[in-house]
Image: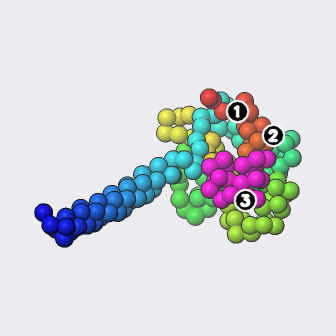
Amino acid sequence: MSENKKHLATSSGSKKTWQAFFIGGAIGFVLCGIVMFLVMPSLMIVTRECKLGFDETVAALEKRIPEHGWIVSGGKAMDLNASLAKHGVDFGPRVKLVKLCNAEHAKSVLTTDRWVSCLMPCTMAVWEGDDGKVYLSEMNMSLMAKMFGGNIAKVMGGNVVHEEKQILEGLLKD
């Protein structure tokens, strides 16, 4: 085989290798995106079963939150069922939202990243499942902190995560 034909054969094989590499990379990227799209919602919200009944869990949160230096925004949990009923919507299983804030943590985050204020105050949802059990759902602060980075990661991933664990201690089933 002449040098020219060898060069063309090698060049053609190299071109096909690069094409396969880029096509494989594009397929991998798309598959990774699909997996992330499907998995992220279950990672962003953490739901755990409560040890106490519905009213007892809400009352315990309203009591414990101020004991740990936080406030319950509005002074008490928001009754989502009552709010819906005001608009003519009847929803049976009970849901209450406990909106909590720590002014110092909020100030620290707002000083550097005001745009994240749409996630404030932190909210814990206490709700009745169709199985009759009581659950608490909240944002996965550790994951959110890692995603945002910077000061948000420092505050949310550090103090907020630690203090929320203390507030919830003994209220949730393992």
Residue 132, image x, y percentages: 53, 34
How many marks do you count on the picture?
3
**Residue on which disc 3 sits:** 150
Task: Choose between 101 and 163: the one closer to the eye.
Answer: 163
Please tell me the numbered disc located at residue 47. Answer: none
Q: Secondary structure at mark 2?
A: helix
Residue 77: say if magenta: no
Magenta highlight range:
141-160
Residue appearing at x 49%, y 39% in the figure? 130
Amino acid type, label 1: Leu
Magenta segment main secondary structure: helix
The CA span between labels 1 and 3 is: 31 Å
Residue 42 showing in the rendered view: yes
Residue 109, image x, y percentages: 78, 61
**Residue on which disc 2 sits:** 64
**Residue on which disc 1 sits:** 171
Q: Secondary structure at mark 1?
A: loop
Residue appearing at x 15%, y 67% in the figure? 2
Q: Is residue 122 above or below residue 128?
A: below
Residue appearing at x 66%, y 59% in the figure? 148
Task: Choose between 66 and 52: the one closer to the eye.
Answer: 66
Residue 90, image x, y percentages: 53, 54
Amino acid type, label 3: Gly
The numbered mark, 2 or 3, whose residue comes first in the sequence reads 2
Of discs 1 and 3, which sits in the foreground? 3
Tell me if mark 2 has few (under 14), some (14-19) or many (20+) residues whose alpha carbon lies within 10 angstroms of its own: some
Location of the N terminus by quadrant is bottom left
Of all residues, the one furthest to the left in this rendering is 1
Residue 155: say if magenta: yes
